[in-house]
Image (cartoon, rainbow, N blue to C red):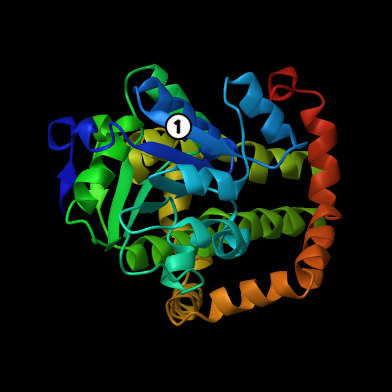
Amino acid sequence: MKIYYDNDADLNYLKGKKIAIIGYGIQGRGQSLCLRDSGLDVIVSEMEGTPNYEQAKKDGFTPVSAAEAARQADVIQILTQDHVQAKVYEEAIKPNLKKGKVLVFSHGFNIRFKQIKPSKNIDVIMIAPKGPGALVRRMYEEGKGVPCLLAIHQDASGNAKNIALAYAKGIKGTTAGVIETTFSEETETDLFGEQAVLCGGVSELIKAGFDTLIEAGYQPEIAYFEVLHELKLITDLIQERGISGMRRGVSNTACYGDLTRGPRIINQKTRKEMKKILKEIVKGKFAKEWIAENETGRKNFDRLMKEGDEHMIEKVGKDLRGMMPWMKKA
């Protein structure tokens, strides 16, 4: 594994170049502000009339269209949502790409699954902070930085890695450490983590635990506290100390239950299904399904979201969070 730090990166590879950030959402805002504060020339693109457009103006930028930003810029970072990146690329960016320009991503989905096919005369790189844009910004302001992933898809200039490292340094990624990977590895592991563990796995596990307690006759409020509310305590411990550290940070009773009952929940059948999900990702089945879902009006997506919103845990949680003033800011 190769990790790069500040001494490996030189901001001069970006000096004299204009960087366009396409999409001023959470990640776009965080990266834009950090790059600008690092002394780099940044232009942002956002749709007029949106909250993000107004935020960009408040932050001292003059937002322009994606086409104009791409026309002006030497380095173009696409930070719109995955499912609209190909459309933005085809309509606004591709016509303004010239030899020598650099295309940047923070997630490899559209390159990995060939929704975007750049010409061979430009550099195509990825700098992916392993944290949300708000955290990228906060760590930058504290002088710490968020670890990043680096990948090179095309190196037309011969300097793609140097440019990528300079970009990472501009958001203080090299202060924390930049790990080299590939577009495929980043995309496939990211999708798998979201589906099998971080979002899909965790949310379904929470609901299953809640439903089990409710069906056994326990109060919904008590069930909510035990299977959802206290989850943050555990994930914070895991993030800070690792799994073994978490086990030493809870009671011996909880630790023994973890060690002996956890494998009964996440069993061989679960692991087999995880392998199936990973295979679907690698072979592009999930990508095709998600692209088709967006092209056909998101009916299945909207139905599933509505069903989730109507689950009892959501009403109970809303009521209980109303009793917790420290939650209101979030």
Q: Nearer the viewer, residue 184 or 321?
A: 184
Quadrant placement of the N terminus:
bottom left
Q: Position of residue 166 (x, y in %)?
A: 26, 37
Instruction: Give the residue displayed 74% in from the left and 45% down from the top.
Output: 223
Q: Position of residue 254 (x, y in %)?
A: 48, 43
Looking at the rendered structure, the number of numbered marks drawn on it comes to 1
Q: Nearer the viewer, residue 13 or 326?
A: 13
Q: Residues within 10 Å of mark 1 (few under 14, many from 20)?
A: many
Instruction: Give the residue displayed 41% in from the left and 40% down from the top.
Output: 238
Is 150 placed above or below 195 here? Answer: above
Is 74 placed above or below 5 here? Answer: below
User: Is residue 93 among what the camera can see?
Assistant: yes
Is 142 placed above or below 314 here? Answer: above
| Disc 1, SS | strand
Is 54 placed above or below 309 here? Answer: above
Instruction: Give the residue displayed 30% in from the left and 65% down from the top.
Output: 121
Q: Which quarter of the figure has residue 92?
A: bottom right
Kindly give the residue lying farthest to the left in the view shown: 7
Q: Is residue 121 left or right of residue 64?
A: left
Q: Is residue 4 left or right of residue 20?
A: left
The residue at which mark 1 appears reads as 42
User: Is residue 172 among what the camera can see?
Assistant: no
Q: Nearer the viewer, residue 64 or 134?
A: 64
Q: Position of residue 229 (x, y in %)?
A: 66, 37
Q: Is residue 18 left or right of residue 51?
A: left
Q: Position of residue 171 (x, y in %)?
A: 36, 31
Q: Amino acid at mark 1?
A: Val
Quadrant placement of the C terminus:
top right
Instruction: Give the residue displayed 27% in from the left and 32% down from the top.
Output: 176
